Image (cartoon, rainbow, N blue to C red):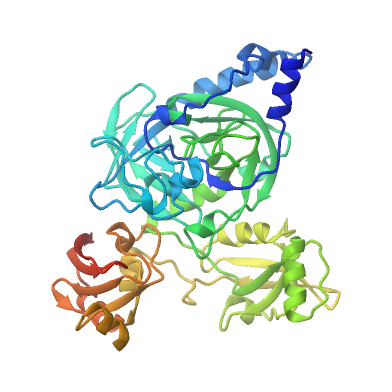
């Protein structure tokens, strides 16, 4: 090996990963992803050299890759996210900064960002997977977030305007539909049966390169990388980790086995540059399938909760911090330590107490919080689960009936949602000081604004002041509920942002 090659390989060796990003959506035009190689020759890593990696393994693997690719590519689509340029929010530390590094976005960085994508160009590009012949498409929530128009382009270049059926920020899954029949589609495989070391293919549209297939193996299961907490207060993270190359634009695309069956939805990469460095993550197909089934049947996700506060005993840093704060002496190991039990929850009803350590749900071993969140989060209210836990060294088993966050055990539809759930925000009265500072006679403070909810879509974030709804002043959450309870049709919202600017925008309640 010559010196030049050795130097190149050293540069390509794995190094400390310093960020986790949605691996995801390409924002802006493809030329923004060009990078200089400083004259280094990277021709060693060509298709030919990759083929040589399979020498000694026989031809079966390569043949399987070809068959799986032919089965998968026609069912993977490009999703173009178009947003209103005049109202598109670009906050500090947004997705652009994740992809390009702080301040290095092609559209500027942070508060200095002045440019926006050219008119009539999409704000983002991602991928999706057709899951039925009548046009249902699964993708990521962050691929479709903020869109006022979604365009779907098939591998044969046919284009459609898609309807967004629903989203779930908790899992970063979305469901779209196009009006077409007889489409190629992928079947869901049982992701619980996948194994570390198994061959997989990642199929999507990275960096604007349509219908790209990369191969690798499952390198880990049940990974939690703490990325979905950016868009959800109750995230479910139990990713399949793969070393198949995933880059911006792959988000929402397919992770398939050698039969071409869907085992995951590519969602994120772990990288310090915004590009592939060896680690990609996909939502397991079992969880993704449950989410889209809920959205199709009920219009929203049905999620069961155990009803406990928890500490991941497999996380040594969390355990150390807990011990220091509480003067405790917990040991690092497998399982989830119960730090609190919610009143009137399924856990309380079953007799689970603070200090118990959950070790198994049904037949699934619980080694970490990721295992627990997946095992419970993939169930619905009313489902019964067998919980194995230890208390003072003794193993116990109880049956727990899962409940929703409001304590219910039955499925809910959109008609069952409260006003705050429908519009995706809670509200607090304004203090006299705030009214004086802004010169207002009325208004409420937006709180706990839901990512992807109606208020979020029109530009309202936490601590913005909502002055009027449908032309009527509001001073409390009860005022908001009185105006919108049972209401269907166009909703007009007048609000004040953090700079004191007054904006009026709207959405439709159905």
Query: Residue 121: x and y, percent?
Result: 28, 35
User: Which residue occupies 56% across, 66% down?
Assistant: 383
- For this orientation, the residue located farthest to the right is 393
Going by the image, does 5 lie left or right of 169? Answer: right
Q: How many marks?
A: 0
Task: Pick whichever, 489 or 501, lies toward us.
Answer: 501
Query: Residue 504: x and y, percent?
Result: 18, 64
- For this orientation, the residue located farthest to the left is 471
Going by the image, does 26 lie left or right of 203? Answer: left
Tell me which corner region of the image, top left, top right, bottom left or bottom right, holds residue 343.
Answer: bottom right
Tell me which corner region of the image, top left, top right, bottom left or bottom right, holds residue 359.
Answer: bottom right
Residue 53 in view here: no
Judge whether 139 appears above or below 55 on screen: below
User: Which residue occupies 26% across, 73% down?
Assistant: 466
Residue 287 in view here: yes
Quadrant where the N terminus lies?
top right
Query: Residue 388: x and y, percent?
Result: 74, 68
Quadrant where the C terminus lies?
bottom left
Query: Residue 221: x and y, percent?
Result: 68, 46
Going by the image, does 455 lie left or right of 328? Answer: left
- For this orientation, the residue located farthest to the bottom is 432
Judge whether 200 appears above or below 466 on screen: above
């Amino acid at each position: 090996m010559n010196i030049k090659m050795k130097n190149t390989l050293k540069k390509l060796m794995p190094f400390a990963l310093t960020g986790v990003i949605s691996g995801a959506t390409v924002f802006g035009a493809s030329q923004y992803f060009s990078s200089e190689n400083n004259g280094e020759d990277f021709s060693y890593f060509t298709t030919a050299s990759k083929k040589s990696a399979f020498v000694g393994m026989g031809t079966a693997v390569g043949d399987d890759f070809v068959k799986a690719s032919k089965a998968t590519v026609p069912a993977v689509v490009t999703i173009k996210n178009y947003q209103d340029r005049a109202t598109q929010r670009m906050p500090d530390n947004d997705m652009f900064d994740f992809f390009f590094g702080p301040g290095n976005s092609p559209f500027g960085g942070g508060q200095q960002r002045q440019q926006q994508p050219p008119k009539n160009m999409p704000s983002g590009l991602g991928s999706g997977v057709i899951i039925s012949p009548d046009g249902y498409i699964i993708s990521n929530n962050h691929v479709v977030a903020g869109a006022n128009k979604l365009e779907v382009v098939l591998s044969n270049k046919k284009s459609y305007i898609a309807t967004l059926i629903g989203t779930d920020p908790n899992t970063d899954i979305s469901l779209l539909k196009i009006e077409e029949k007889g489409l190629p589609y992928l079947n869901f495989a049982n992701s619980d049966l996948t194994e570390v070391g198994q061959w997989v293919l990642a199929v999507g549209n990275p960096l604007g390169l349509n219908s790209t297939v990369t191969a690798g193996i499952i390198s880990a299961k049940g990974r939690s990388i703490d990325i979905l907490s950016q868009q959800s207060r109750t995230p479910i993270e139990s990713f399949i980790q793969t070393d198949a190359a995933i880059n911006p634009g792959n988000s929402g695309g397919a992770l398939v086995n050698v039969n071409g069956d869907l085992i995951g939805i590519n969602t994120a990469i772990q990288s310090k540059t915004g590009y592939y460095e060896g680690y990609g993550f996909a939502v397991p197909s079992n969880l993704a399938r449950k989410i889209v089934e809920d959205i199709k049947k009920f219009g929203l996700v049905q999620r069961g909760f155990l009803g406990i506060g928890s500490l991941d005993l497999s996380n040594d840093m969390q355990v150390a911090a807990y011990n220091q704060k509480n003067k405790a002496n917990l040991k690092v190991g497998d399982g989830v330590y119960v730090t609190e039990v919610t009143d009137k929850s399924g856990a309380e009803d079953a007799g689970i107490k603070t200090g118990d350590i959950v070790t198994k749900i049904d037949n699934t071993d619980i080694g970490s919080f990721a295992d627990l969140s997946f095992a419970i989060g993939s169930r619905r209210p009313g489902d019964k689960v067998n919980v194995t836990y230890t208390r003072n060294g003794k193993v116990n088993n109880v049956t727990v009936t899962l409940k929703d966050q409001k304590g219910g055990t039955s499925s809910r539809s959109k008609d069952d949602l409260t006003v705050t759930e429908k519009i995706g925000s809670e509200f607090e009265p304004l203090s006299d000081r705030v009214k004086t500072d802004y010169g207002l006679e009325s208004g409420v403070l937006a709180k706990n604004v839901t990512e992807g909810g109606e208020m979020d879509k029109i530009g309202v974030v936490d601590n913005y002041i909502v002055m009027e709804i449908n032309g009527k002043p509001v001073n409390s959450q009860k005022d908001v509920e009185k105006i919108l309870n049972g209401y269907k049709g166009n909703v007009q919202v007048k609000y004040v942002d953090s700079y004191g600017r007054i904006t009026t925008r709207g959405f439709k309640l159905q």
